[in-house]
Amino acid sequence: MGPIRAVGHGLANLVNFRGRTRWDKFWPYVAFVIFLSLAGMGAIMLPEMSASMERMQRFAEEHPDQATVERGPGSYSITIRGYHPELMPDFSRMMSLIVVGFVAIIFLLAAAVVRRLHDRGKSGAWALMPIPFIVFASVAMPMLFNQFSQGGTPDLGLFFALFFNNMLYLASLVYLIVLLCGASTKGENRYGPEPAA
């Protein structure tokens, strides 16, 4: 099956959590979703970072005594002295949009992951492993970035909780990927007949 047909299969079965999906239909669809997510991240972050850079450049022009601009072949940097939170990107807004992006990715991948696990003879419940870590990070990260953007002292307990949460998230994600990469169950299993090649 070609990649375009595999993507079409994934999109046509967005809410179908029954049956099985072979690896050759699953992985091209996952690549498509990853491409979409990277494009979405760029669409979220680039405008905010660009606006922040423009604010810094304007500030450097208006306050040359508080800013140093260095230009060189292939490099450009602005150093601003003092505390100026108004020049920083709106991290809490960016994180909120990233959370929305994660929800979209989960929606796009959920059924495909469950069907792929079924093809391996595994329960779709294995797909839930990373979810608690994503939920915690979705709540805690905007709180931490908000502390930074408001100039307050960041909560180190929250920082370390996020650090360990992210380590556990990565471990659960790697284990899930290992499960998804395995060979299909030959013949019929409890989730249905073996999908056609």
Image: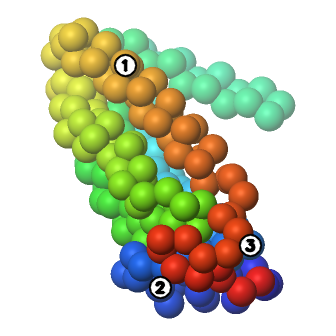
- Would you call the spot at circle 3 few (<14 residues within 10 Å), some (14-19), or many (20 or more)? few
| Upstream in sequence: badge 1 or badge 3 | 3
Depicted 6 relative to depicted 36: above or below? below
Q: Quadrant of residue 147?
A: top left
Q: Position of residue 64 (x, y in %)?
A: 45, 22
Q: Residue at x 60, y 60 (%)?
A: 120
- Disc 2 marks which amino acid? Asn
- Would you call the spot at circle 2 few (<14 residues within 10 Å), some (14-19), or many (20 or more)? some
Who is closer to the viewer here, 123 or 49?
A: 123
Q: Residue at x 51, y 41 (%)?
A: 173
- Disc 1 marks which amino acid? Phe
Query: Which numbered disc covers residue 13?
Result: 2
- Would you call the spot at circle 1 few (<14 residues within 10 Å), some (14-19), or many (20 or more)? few
Q: Position of residue 49 (x, y in %)?
A: 46, 45
Does 179 sit left or right of 159 as displayed? right
Question: Could you tell me which secondary element the residue under label 3 belongs to?
Answer: helix
- Disc 3 marks which amino acid? Asp
Who is closer to the viewer here, 39 or 88?
A: 39
Give the Cα distance between marks 1 and 3: 34 Å
| Upstream in sequence: badge 2 or badge 3 | 2
Give the Cα distance between marks 2 and 1: 35 Å
Q: Quadrant of residue 189?
A: bottom right
| Upstream in sequence: badge 2 or badge 1 | 2
Task: From the image, tell me which residue sits under label 3.
Answer: 24
Task: From the image, tell me which residue sits under label 1.
Answer: 164
Instruction: Report the number of numbered marks.
Output: 3
Q: Residue at x 68, y 64 (%)?
A: 184
Give the Cα distance between marks 2 and 3: 15 Å
Query: Which numbered disc covers residue 109?
Result: none
Q: Position of residue 136 (x, y in %)?
A: 24, 36
